[in-house]
Image: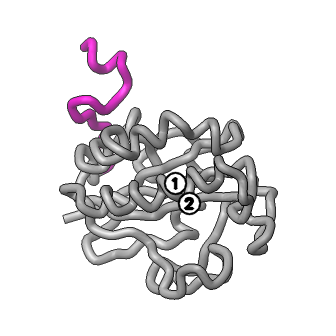
Amino acid sequence: MPHLALYTFGVLKSPLTDPGPLTRELLKSGEAVYRKISQHPGYLARAEAADRGRGTHFDLDWGAWGEFAVPTWYGKGRTVETAALDATLSLWTDLPSAFDAIYTGLHREALSRRHDWFERTGQPNYVLWWVSDGVIPTWQDGVSRLEHLHDQGSAPHAFTFHHPFAPDGTPTRTKGIGPKSDQAR
């Protein structure tokens, strides 16, 4: 059975090493969010570095998730002192589980604060796609899909919760997910 891959990417207003209260707040809330999401029904796995804390995202060993990559439009630093990004890559059993985890609870609270922490780039900040059972998506897959979403819009190759596709490539809608215009039909 296919699994749902979810890649998120955001450009922070300040580098991760910024000692300011907003950066500390983001890092603290992120730890709690990850703990909660990892217990959510439908959650399968997320990219975690084997050597967490020993460099930037770019320097870490991500194992089967591949070498860390960022979209071409990311123009901030790549060193410990200058990296200003947050990215996640995860696997889910289905759309409703991922949607529920993202748009409820602690993650929803964090989303309501995103403009305190992240720049408004005009780029999509997440993308979804289906992978075959047993396949681990890579960071480069996530970047490629996010850029495809930006350039081509939602399609079976790269889509959003609001314009989702089933594993067979057909447009779909799950209760609470999809364009509001679809809900009125």
Write down the residue under mark 2. 87
Measured as percent of width and height from the top left, residue 152 is found at 58, 42
> Residue 93's quadrant in the figure?
bottom left
- Tally the marks: 2
Q: Is residue 72 visible?
A: no
Q: Are marks 2 and 1 in contact (CB under 8 Å)?
A: yes
Which stretch appears magenta? Answer: 169-185
Q: Based on the displayed image, in which of its 4 quarters is residue 79 positioned?
A: bottom right
Using the image, determine if residue 121 lies above or below residue 69. Answer: above
Q: Which residue is mark 1?
A: 8
| Magenta portion: prevailing SS class | loop
* Viewer-side residue, 82 vs 163: 82
Residue at image x 74%, y 52%? Answer: 14
- Find the residue positioned furthest to the top: 184
| Residue type highlighted by circle 2 | Ala
Q: Is residue 142 visible?
A: yes
Label 2 element class? strand
In the picture, measured across the screen, residue 58 lies left or right of residue 184, that is right
Q: CA distance from mark 2 to mark 1?
A: 5 Å
Q: Residue at x 68, y 62 (%)?
A: 16
The image position of residue 167, as x and y in percent, is 28, 53
Q: Quadrant of the N terminus?
A: bottom left
